[in-house]
Image (cartoon, grey):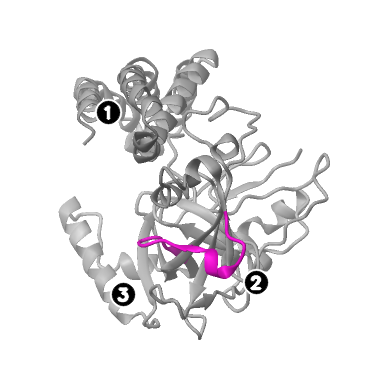
Amino acid sequence: MKKCLFFFLLLVCFRFVSFADEGMWLPQLLEQLNEKRMKSLGMKISAKDIYNVNKGSLKDAIVSFGGFCTGEVISDQGLVLTNHHCGFEVIQSHSTIDNNLLRDGFWAKNLGMELPNQGLFVTFIVRIDDVTKAILTNVTDNMSEKEKQQTIAKNMDALKRATPVESYQDILIRAFFDGNQYFRFITETYRDVRLVGAPPSSIGNFGKDTDNWTWPRHTGDFSMFRIYADKNNKPAAYSPDNVPYKPKKSLTISLKGLKENDFTMIFGFSGRTQEYLPAEAVDQIVNSSNPIKIDIRTIALGIMDKYMRSDEGIKIQYAKKYAGIANAWKKWQGEVLGLTKTDGVGKKKKYEAEFLKLLGANPTLKSKYQHVLPEITEAYKEIKPYNYAKDVYLETTGK
């Protein structure tokens, strides 16, 4: 199947991963840079259908859920679909021994049964603008790093003050490409988000389930919420008078299924990437960092499991904590296994050797950058014992 996986990340970085292509595909630049290629892979919509500031587009159907997940608006009444683990803490908060939603699941049969959640929010992207020129004004190469950051911070503050927004909108300015570009995000955050449905743990469990972090996966990893707004469809704190939010765009769910060579695209708020770590750092993940963390969590999970199995109340209280610990524990095991089986460290070393060879063939680039990779590698070697100590401390103290 031809795949075009497109991840949009609000706070950390943009990253594009695909079996067919790879790159950093920014939504506001798709029409200029990527639309032709995406259409060649089978995309039938236009770049404007994905990102458009003048009318509803896919960006208006995708939310940052709680600041840590992606959600998709799937109805004109503000229904939001997200992963089960993204709603796990909320589901836990409504669970008791007599009404265990984690174990038995939950489905609101009408709007009145939907459960409010203090502190839960969803954020929409209104627009994204390249503000690099404004942010880097008066920043020069002969400045110290401290002077550069002070000037950039001053420019950011000035630009925020000069940017007109509504009272219910926020401004975020983030650096990309190691500070070579800056983008301004205008966002709207809705803080009345209510639980609509969640599967029972026999279907939607995560963290310790057998097929977590594996493929194929058979877990029903989903939960459903609804966004509420004031009578003018604007963000508002929780109120019984709020009404279901009417989005500019909602996703349509097709029951037709997929066929070979269909174009697929994922548009959402992704996590961090470690793709560009040097070989020395990857080697430490495989042989130092992950193994000690796995060992410590194996002991911790065993202790927690013992008491959770003996008391239903304890099981409910510790469900989120246990699942979170087990989630990373399973992921790290997969990383070690995958990197070992594929000789990830060896491949990184070959890639770096080729990089240095190409760098050496260009006198201008060689004189400017030949020291970078060796210095980064040496730095990782120097901090290895400190990273090990940090991992042990954080895993044993829970800080």
Residue range in magenta is 107-123
User: Residue at label 1?
Assistant: 375
Name the side, left or right, on which 68 lies relative to 139. Answer: right
Residue at image x 75%, y 48%?
A: 263
Along the polypeptide, which appears first: circle 1 or circle 2?
2
**Which residue type carries mark 2?**
Asp
Which residue lies at the image location 47% right of the left edge and 65% below the top edge? 193
Q: CA distance from mark 3 to mark 2?
A: 32 Å
Q: Amino acid at mark 3?
A: Lys
For label 3, the SS is helix
Mark sitting earlier along the chain (3/2):
2
Q: CA distance from mark 1 to mark 2?
A: 54 Å
Mark 3 vs mark 1: in front: 3
> Which quarter of the figure has residue 184?
bottom left
In the picture provided, is 47 more to the left or to the right than 237?
right
**Residue picked out by circle 2:** 76
Q: Residue 276 in the image: x percent, y percent?
A: 43, 34
Mark 2 falls on what kind of element?
loop
